[in-house]
Image (cartoon, rainbow, N blue to C red):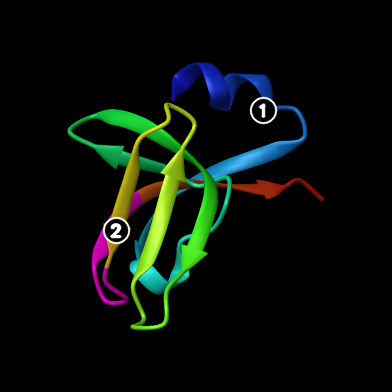
Amino acid sequence: MIEEIATSMSTHHHVRVQVTGKAVRTGDVIDFGGRGYTVIDVLDFSDGTRGLRFRTGEELIVQPNDELSAVRAFKRR
């Protein structure tokens, strides 16, 4: 996670945020046990759940109200 954040420090600022399953975006870095997983794809299912695909190839199904800790990049002004 630190490596990815360092590559875009000049154009973006990074903020740690709490997001719900329905608010996760592509590019968010989700923290699981101190390890960062970059979301590369978000799939919406008909029952409201979402599938998150990570750069590592792993996938996670989340409920709309599941809370996740993430780092989100915002463009500098």
Q: Residue furthest front?
A: 46
Q: Residue at the spot x=42%, y=31% of the render?
A: 57
C-alpha separation, residue under disc 2 versus residue under disc 1: 30 Å
Within 10 angstroms of label 2, few (less than 14), some, or many (20 or more) residues?
A: some
Task: Kindly identify which numbered label has been placed on residue 9.
Answer: 1
Q: Is residue 15 left or right of residue 17?
A: right
The location of residue 66, given as percent across then percent down, is: 24, 68
Within 10 angstroms of label 1, few (less than 14), some, or many (20 or more) residues?
A: few
Task: Kindly identify which numbered label has been placed on residue 61.
Answer: 2
Q: What span is colored magenta in the figure? A: 63-69
Q: Residue furthest left?
A: 33
The location of residue 58, given as percent across then percent down, is: 35, 35
Residue 14 picture quarter: top right
Label 1: element kind: loop
Residue 68: within the magenta? yes
The location of residue 63, given as percent across then percent down, is: 26, 71
